[in-house]
Image (cartoon, grey):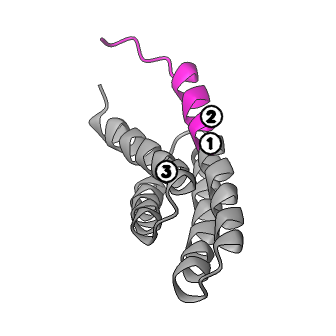
Amino acid sequence: MDWGRVAFVIFSLGSTTSIAGFFYDPNVVVLFIALALNLITTTLKIGVQKQFASELLGGSLAALLHLIPAFIFFQILNDNIYASMLMLGALVSNVFCLVVIIIDGTKNTDTEY
């Protein structure tokens, strides 16, 4: 079992579920948690030499490019509509990353149990 991959998937799922939680309760704390988890996930993706590493890093950076302005719109400008639209874009980007993680996991040919 690759514990680095386990930690990476945990942070990816945490970021995605916290973004989804923002739609349930639009709160600046939930938005900050989503941003922090996505920053951790992005740093874990840097330097990975897997088959889909560039797609994962690109999807994570796209999510960050949605989350940072969403935080600014929500906290500083008090505009919930634009923040929600940007959070939806970050959610789509994270779901894309999770699909790529699943595809990468099924293509893995490790036979060690």
Q: Which residue is mark 2?
A: 99
Q: Earlier in the sequence, mark 3 or mark 1?
A: 3
Q: Are marks 2 and 1 in contact (CB under 8 Å)?
A: yes
Q: Is residue 72 above or below residue 112?
A: below
Tell me the amino acid under the disc marked 2.
Val
**What whole-number distance in Å separates the C-alpha atoms at marks 3 and 1?**
14 Å
Residue 7 occupies quadrant: top left
Q: Position of residue 105 (x, y in %)?
A: 51, 26
Query: Which label belongs to residue 95?
Result: 1
Classed neighbour count for the residue bearing mark 3: other residues with Cα under 10 Å, few (<14), some (14–19), many (≥20): some
Q: Is residue 69 above or below residue 107?
A: below
Element class at badge 3 = helix
Between label 3 and label 2, give the one nearer the viewer.
3
* Magenta-colored span: 97-113
Classed neighbour count for the residue bearing mark 1: other residues with Cα under 10 Å, few (<14), some (14–19), many (≥20): some
Tell me the amino acid under the disc marked 1.
Val
Q: Which residue is mark 3?
A: 21
Nearest the viewer among 97 and 23 is 23
Nearest the viewer among 8 and 87 is 87
Element class at badge 2 = helix
Q: Earlier in the sequence, mark 3 or mark 2?
A: 3
Nearest the viewer among 32 and 109 is 32
Where, quadrant-wise, is the N terminus in this rendering?
top left
The secondary structure that dominates the magenta segment is helix
Q: Image check: 71 left or right of 33? A: right
Element class at badge 1 = helix
Q: Position of residue 75 (x, y in %)?
A: 51, 82
What residue is shown at x 63% (from left), y 58% (from top)? 90
Q: Is residue 77 above or below residue 74?
A: below
Q: Position of residue 97 (x, y in %)?
A: 60, 44
Q: Are marks 3 and 2 in contact (CB under 8 Å)?
A: no
Tell me the amino acid under the disc marked 3.
Gly
